[in-house]
Image: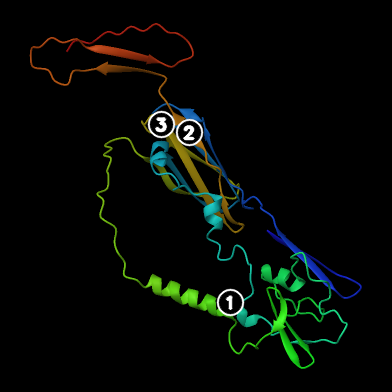
Amino acid sequence: VQVVAYAILPSETVIANSADFSTEQCFSHKVSLEFSPTSAVPGEETIMQVTTQPESLCGVSAVDQSVLIKEPGKTLDADKIFQLLPVKKISYIPYDVQDDVECLHVRPRRYVMPYRHGGGTADAYTVFQNVGMKMATNMVIREPSCLKYKGREYYQGHHGYGVGLRYNSVPTIARMEVMTARGSAGAAAAPYMPSPDKSPIETVRTFFPETWIWDLVEVGESGTKDVSLTVPDTITTWETEAFCLSPQGFGLAPRKNITVFQPFFLELSLPYSIIRGEHFELKATTFNYLTSCIMVTVTPTPS
């Protein structure tokens, strides 16, 4: 946020200053997403509740967290949305709308500026220009860049005023900007050199999905929508993402997780190969992540 403060003194001198303040990037359209229960076992039924403005259309997704760890930075957040705005901060006035400044006629024993120059303080005109504001006033808000004294013109430089020549074309700074822009355009027109081809690494997954939810949810007049879902068989953490559109604008929900875990299961250790008639030892390992101890009996069935 850019804030400008200015004051007009009794001497008709205008003083001004500006400051930038960082604010939290948020949306007026509030969206939330919850799971009940927040943790489940594979194949269990769960309820996903979306809360938003009435008559909203929401996009909801749930992706395996391991996929997002391998490819970070591909999630949607408020920073990416605000980066899409065409104007985020204005710090200049286009040259073609700036006012021409005539040389100020001065007399002996008279101060040129409405205040003594020093300390690096910018005049009011510069303060307004740095936030993209153009002022229309008859007050003295701009420090003159040219003085006319006894028929001679003096132009302001880094070390004060000195005799110089009047601009007959675009100022040097503007010409430098034009040349820089042309140079950039020439660089952009250089032939494109493709990078060496890299064969993509593909991970074959035959049964367990990497994306569980990828759907649109319509929310009615109540502003709440319950969706019944079946948890996949993957033992993982699913990371959800939801955004909604309504007449009130765009809304983004905080990210929520639902953990899928099997607290008790049996794992068989099988040999990589056997032949007919061979006797081998079959190892069965039980994993218990319950909060209490239980008695387990493992009995193989005839085969």
Q: Is residue 16 left or right of residue 190?
A: right
Residue 244 location in percent, x, y?
54, 52
Say if mark 1 contacts mark 3, CB within 8 Å. Answer: no
Looking at the rendered structure, the number of numbered marks drawn on it comes to 3
Residue labelled with disc 2: 258
For disc 3, the neighbor class at 10 Å (few under 14, some 14 to 19, many from 20) is some
Observer-nearest residue: 135 or 32? Answer: 135
Which quadrant of the figure contains the N terminus? bottom right
Query: Going by the picture, which residue comes out furthest to the right?
Result: 10
Vertical order, 139 against 246 (above or below)? below
Residue 127 location in percent, x, y?
72, 68
Q: Is residue 273 left or right of residue 199?
A: left
Image color mode: rainbow
Q: Residue at x 85, y 79 (%)?
A: 111
Q: Which-is-in-front pick, marks 1 and 2?
A: 1
Observer-nearest residue: 210 or 142? Answer: 142
Say which quarter of the image contains residue 130: bottom right
Amino acid type shown at disc 3: Thr
Amino acid type shown at disc 1: Ile
Q: Which callout, 1 or 2, points at the residue further toward the start of the chain?
A: 1
Q: Which callout, 1 or 3, points at the residue further toward the start of the chain?
A: 1
In whole angstroms, how far apart are the C-alphas of marks 1 and 3? 59 Å
